Image: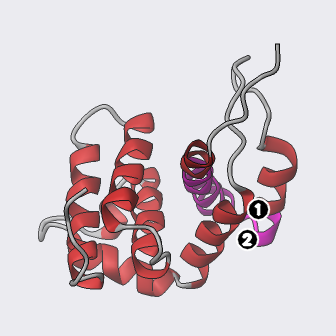
Amino acid sequence: MATQKPSAKARRSAARLAAVQALYQMEQSGTPLETVIAEFVRHRFGEPVEGEAMVEPDAELFGDIVRGTRIRGDEVDALVAGALDAQLTLPRLDLLLRCVMRAGAWELLANLHVPAPIVISEYVNVTRAFFGGKEPAMVNAVLDRIAREQRPGESRAG
């Protein structure tokens, strides 16, 4: 019996999750950008996790998100910081949560062919993979604020 090839949507979702993990790894270890990207593509994509087969991420989207988020880091951080509630600051957020918000903010800023509601939904889902509390709602609120600022003419209907 032949295995079914994952959909393009599933591969894009997997790319977003992997990009957040790569951004987190760079922040934790200081590993250079291209080294982390190459490591993920060569050694992690398509490998089982805890014995379970995983969807192979869209390598091009993965690379775009990781590179774009890092290269435009100051701009991305300013967007996220400006969308946070007044009592929060970017440095006070959990590192993984910052990585999720940064990747989502970059996509809203630069990946304009993907509608904002899809970007927001994808990163809320990534957040749910790691957090079980109020964090998904926070990511939704922050990315929605960024979308309203960066894409004012785009419909919110999803």
Q: What residue lies at 32% left-to-right and 73% top-to-bottom?
A: 80
Most frequent secondary structure within the magenta stretch: helix
Residue on which disc 2 sits = 33
Amino acid type of the residue tagged 1 in the rendering? Ile
Relative placement, left or right, of 21 versus 141 is right
**Label 1 secondary element:** helix
Q: Quadrant of the C terminus?
A: bottom left
Q: What residue lies at 42% left-to-right and 64% top-to-bottom?
A: 104
Using the image, determine if residue 113 lies above or below residue 4. Answer: below
Spot occupied by residue 48 in the image (x, y as percentages of width and height): 76, 27
Query: Residue 79 lies in what quarter of the image?
Result: bottom left
Residue on which disc 1 sits = 37
Outermost residue toward the right? 42
Q: What residue lies at 27% left-to-right and 45% top-to-bottom?
A: 135
Using the image, determine if residue 28 lies above or below residue 114. Answer: above
Using the image, determine if residue 62 lies above or below residue 110. Answer: above
- Magenta stretch: residue 85 in it? no
**Label 2 secondary element:** helix
CB within 8 Å, label 1 to label 2: yes
Give the mark toward the camera: 1 or 2: 1
Amino acid type of the residue tagged 2 in the rendering? Leu
Outermost residue toward the top? 1
Q: Quadrant of the N terminus?
A: top right
Q: Which residues are magenta?
A: 15-35
Query: Residue 83 lies in what quarter of the image?
Result: bottom left
